Image (spheres, rainbow, N blue to C red):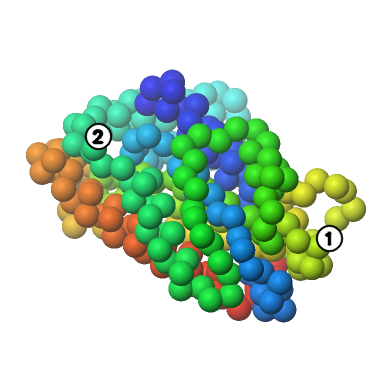
Amino acid sequence: MNIKFKLVLILTVAALSSACSHNQPNHIDMSARQHVDDVDAYLAVTQDEIYADIDRSATAAAAGGGLLFALIDAAIDNSRTSDAEDLIKPIRNSLIDFDYAEMLQSTIEKRFNDIKWMNVNKVELERSIGDGHVIDKIQKSKVSAVLFMTVDYKLASNFDAVTTSAALIMFPNKEALYEFKEQIDNNEHPADNSDNIYKNTITVTIPLGLGGDKEANASILAKSNASEVKKALEKSAQKIAQDIIIDIEADEVKG
């Protein structure tokens, strides 16, 4: 994993953590929906290429913790990451002209037409995000609410599936919606995690139909010009888009 990609991954994880620091989902209150009309939607896909997950070392956990064992874990994980990088290179080369982020944007944008009480004219794709981007978008918005979707996608550690995760969070930008925040606070920060009127994380895993070890699976995928990976990503885009719409439409769940 090169330095650039490591930094991109750190930024993505940071965005996911800051937007959805609590795992408990929060669905839009039924009473709030009459106040939701136009919504600005942003899709952040900060990766420029797929990566492979790794089976993380659990030496420290097995040994009861400690700095030495944590360092051993880090060394093992680094070695496994390096091995995965070598295996995934030819697969990535076959995906150079395959823009998953753009496909996901188009697919989600079309599916928003299925929601009758909320109007999303466009899903804006962001390939990079920085500190303060959430607040900046909210403050510049002129509509009732702003939805942020942050996506991460990867091959499973055994190279036998593709997994896409979308962290979703919506902030109100209209006074009539403020009372429906997950938690009312007294500060003036409009994008604290508790200020949301909706949040959840949706994960979709598409199997690749392979039964070998990771080296054998990686070889098959590389020799097929990653055709099965492309098909899985197409299915993933459709399923993620469908699940986002279903989840936004879901009945109220307060955590």
Between disc 2 and disc 1, whose residue precedes?
2
Q: Is residue 219 above or below residue 187?
A: above
Image side of residue 31 versus residue 149, left or right: right
Please tell me the numbered disc located at residue 236: none
Relative depth, front residue between 19 and 45:
45
Q: Is residue 215 visible?
A: no
Return the residue at label 1.
Answer: 184
- Residue type (three-letter) at the residue carrying disc 2: Ile
Q: Nearer the viewer, mark 2 or mark 1?
A: 2
Which residue shows up at 52% across the image and 38% down it? 12
Q: Is residue 1 above or below residue 165?
A: above
Image side of residue 225 versus residue 53, left or right: left
- Residue type (three-letter) at the residue carrying disc 1: Ile
Which residue shows up at 67% across the image and 50% down it? 141
Q: Which quadrant would the C terminus be assigned to in this image?
A: bottom right
Q: Secondary structure at mark 2?
A: loop
Return the residue at label 2.
Answer: 96
Q: Secondary structure at mark 1?
A: loop
Q: CA distance from mark 2 to mark 1?
A: 46 Å
